Image (cartoon, coloured by chain):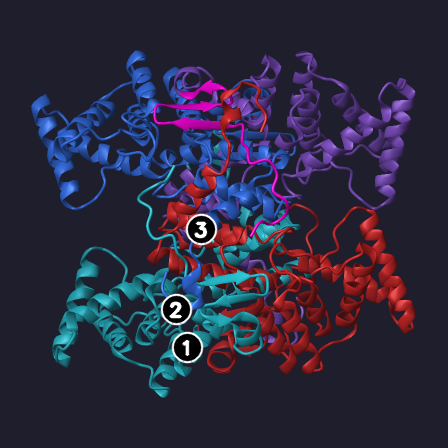
Chain colours: A cyan, B red, C blue, D purple
Amino acid sequence: MMIGKPGAARTAISTADPRSITIRGYDLASELIGAVSFTEFFFLHVTGKRPTENQRFFLDALLVTIAEHGLTPTVQTARMTLAAAPDALQGAVAAGILGCGSVVLGTAEYCAVLLRQAAARTAGKPDAERDRVVLEMTREIKDRGERLPGFGHPLHKPADPRTERLLALADQRGASGVHVDLLRRFARAAATVWGKPLVLNVSGPIAAVLLDLDFPDAAIKGIPILARTAGIIGHLAEERETPIGFLLAAKAEEAIDHSAAKIRGGKA
Amino acid sequence: MMIGKPGAARTAISTADPRSITIRGYDLASELIGAVSFTEFFFLHVTGKRPTENQRFFLDALLVTIAEHGLTPTVQTARMTLAAAPDALQGAVAAGILGCGSVVLGTAEYCAVLLRQAAARTAGKPDAERDRVVLEMTREIKDRGERLPGFGHPLHKPADPRTERLLALADQRGASGVHVDLLRRFARAAATVWGKPLVLNVSGPIAAVLLDLDFPDAAIKGIPILARTAGIIGHLAEERETPIGFLLAAKAEEAIDHSAAKIRGGKA
Amino acid sequence: MMIGKPGAARTAISTADPRSITIRGYDLASELIGAVSFTEFFFLHVTGKRPTENQRFFLDALLVTIAEHGLTPTVQTARMTLAAAPDALQGAVAAGILGCGSVVLGTAEYCAVLLRQAAARTAGKPDAERDRVVLEMTREIKDRGERLPGFGHPLHKPADPRTERLLALADQRGASGVHVDLLRRFARAAATVWGKPLVLNVSGPIAAVLLDLDFPDAAIKGIPILARTAGIIGHLAEERETPIGFLLAAKAEEAIDHSAAKIRGGKA
Amino acid sequence: MMIGKPGAARTAISTADPRSITIRGYDLASELIGAVSFTEFFFLHVTGKRPTENQRFFLDALLVTIAEHGLTPTVQTARMTLAAAPDALQGAVAAGILGCGSVVLGTAEYCAVLLRQAAARTAGKPDAERDRVVLEMTREIKDRGERLPGFGHPLHKPADPRTERLLALADQRGASGVHVDLLRRFARAAATVWGKPLVLNVSGPIAAVLLDLDFPDAAIKGIPILARTAGIIGHLAEERETPIGFLLAAKAEEAIDHSAAKIRGGKA
């Protein structure tokens, strides 16, 4: 049973024979192992091209930026799962990754869509017109009752230290292009529209820098996922030494009122 | 409800306040972003220490070695899952990772256990005694009808090109220690015990090099998982452009005889 | 760090003390175990109410309908994952469930949205007006280049036998209401708009019957997931006896042209 | 690439053509939908046989018994994952299922192994000899520093109300056989060996009843997984109405001391 119409039955990523493995046209053993970093390999694997120096630098910087942020829901999920199923490390990692969704780690993707739309609508336009378009887009989002992707953070105020660092690096290394510029216009527009500055969270520069450096769209959500996988593995190594998974669950449970469960037809 | 006895309610990985994030004692924004590679960050995150040059080099080399090996079950699983649920990239990655199990990507861990046992039993012993112990351990494994962890490969014959490259690099860079030495003794013992050379697959040098470079045990299975996550993300980016997920399922299904399902009490 | 604004810290599902467990106001040991079927329990758990006879009957019927459809991508994914990680049954089940997405098993949810919209737009309207609204909605969907949720099947032609059976049962048992009626109007409208009859697949009656029987929206996607979990477990029991997981992967891989991977910058 | 040796390329579960679906020799539309309950279907799917009345009754009873036990780690994991990724219900269910591991829901499987071993060692032996063998097995387990599978519970004391109910039902309905008998001998032996009565938790009667009713081994771990899937879906429906996922994570995080993260080389 073929679901949908079959397309080309082809892959361009790798092929192997008894004596060799070829990835994106490179011999794995002689040209990649020991010759490229894991980050360079990831770029080659996803895009089919070797990274430029700035692409490599910022891919490393972005992965480092979002790999770790404490006992987030993704990390708690992974640690509780390892406590319950200690023999299956892969299951605990998978459970953690499943929390990289639209609310928690996926906003970089929505921010990228916003920046691409703004870029399309302002291409070749003068400076003032760019500000006008961005202000209009920001107003429309607020009027629809939506949140502006890339803005707001539950902890970091008045600024997200990661955002400031990434934007400073992008400027220093000549990597800031049209998308970083538009992101800053959105920050100013948000302050006008909401009547106060909003915190530009880390999803903003992730999206803007990736777009300015020609990363493919399909990789944008992959980057937080790969980064967080590394962070989850570190937490799981700690969980094996100093288990807190069940303690997290016990403390969380205590905070919830269960009394409605005593009543037939009760509501939470 | 606390499952088991609560231990120390502590984590040493990271902490954050409104203006900063500290990871393993380093300020994320000023000391890590743009200053360390993703691989160096991963080492620091998992171990709490900065890597030596050889630890960094081989961690990169091992991650590159096992990130990709074609349309493996893990990759097919991820691509089929994305075809069925295209909105949830994290779900497709998680499905792929769930296949990093004891049969497919987890053998490095078993190989590490074997090498640690051999190291404990041969510590301080002369050369001939080491060979004798390894030969005895190999015989016991064969006599129990088990496979020797780290040996055998469905495709690569007479040698796994990745293994040869990793061992050559370990020798060149002075990283080969007691575990690499024992691994080679197991290769010779296997040829004696099985009466023919067995292919030393990539799990062998992964385990041996990690042990010789003092990687913590808890990280050993994490390394194939992180590496494969990168490979899966690349395949999912390709799946979005050139979908083959449902085609893989259709071709696989055609190869299976379903006729026993017509019979009540039929057996596969 | 609290993500978002905290709401009520309450659950109404269950509570326990050393001597009892209470679920939705019922004592588990004395009032539910041995007293209600699993299907009745599931209804009570999700809705907080005991099912009527028709709610129980159709919940059973729908779960039976969609639990199994051969070596689907979800089942292949689960079987490959068990082959790779045989010690973690839960991981193989989870991998299978991750394929219950918007394309494969999630269309009942979209169909429910469509039927709810049609119900809102035709409430209290005469028969001819209902047909007119449904025809207009169908035309709009086709004009947007979209598929009509609940229609089309890769295998079943000219009709899906499960659909026919469910609709016949709904009529026989007096369960067909406004949503089943609208579903049939969509079938007629689809034939007009596409110029040929479209197969009404099983997602249509699942959505229509559930809505006519007052199932909560949140349960609609849960039903295919629970049903398919049962089917996956059966396949995994067979996989342990008669393994085909790696064979499926091998046959699928053979069908794909890997030659572009030999070329730097090659495309699939 | 074929991993391992290919076995028979066969399945006996289901087959389909354009006009029908056949499952285990039964026509799905005319013989199963509306004719069997979901529980009966599950039994048929997994075993290839129709259940006896007691097999159906106890499969329902066991599924009801273990579907729900409050805000367990599996449920918290599922609810946090839905909060983070609300568009992917399947991901939240999968994350929850991944916690059905060896510590939390998998002990029924270990208990089954213990009961099978005891049955093999006492077959045809007189009563006193049975007690002697069970006592000896219990002592060996305690001497190895292991826990006795099926005994101990973090909340239920002095008895697990579910256990008592299941054993009473097994006696009433004539379903108690050799494995239920051996389970009771283990309870007495445990009191002797540990010097105090141990709580017989629900995994004990799950294993014993399933074995006495000839359920296949492969289904034993599948039963808690299927049951818990139903429970998770109910919690996710509540999470959509009354979200507590992020609140659980915030409360849990507050309970953990993060100060060691400020120190380079700090330990948890």
Helix, strand or loop for disc 1: loop
Numbered circles on residues, count: 3
Please tell me whether residue D205 is drawn above or below residue A210 in the rendered image.
above
Residue D156 seen from this side? yes
Disc 2/disc 3 C-alpha distance (Å):
21 Å
| Residue picked out by circle 2 | A47
Q: Quadrant of residue C174?
A: top left
The residue carrying pointer 3 sits among few (fewer than 14), some (14 to 19) or many (20 or more) residues within 10 Å by Cα, namely many
Disc 1/disc 2 C-alpha distance (Å):
9 Å
For image coordinates 61% across by 56% down, the residue present is: B105
Q: Quadrant of residue C53?
A: top left
Please tell me whether residue C179 is drawn above or below residue B220 in the rendered image.
above
| Residue picked out by circle 1 | A51
Could you tell me which quadrant the C terminus of chain C lies in? bottom left
| Residue picked out by circle 3 | B91
Residue C4 seen from this side? no
**Residue C195 image point, x, y percent:** 13, 32
Say the numbered circle drawn on residue B251: none
Disc 3/disc 1 C-alpha distance (Å):
27 Å
- Residue nearest the viewer, comparing B92 with B69: B69
**Residue C222 image point, x, y percent:** 41, 36
For image coordinates 88% across by 68% down, the residue present is: B130
Q: Quadrant of residue D177?
A: top right
Do the dots labelled 3 and 1 sit on one chain? no
- Residue nearest the viewer, comparing C157 with C229: C157
Q: Nearer the viewer, mark 2 or mark 3?
A: 2
Q: Chain of mark 2?
A: A
- Which residue range is magenta in the image? D1-28
Do the dots labelled 1 and 2 sit on one chain? yes
Marks 2 and 3 close (CB-CB < 8 Å): no
Helix, strand or loop for disc 2: helix
Q: Chain of mark 3?
A: B
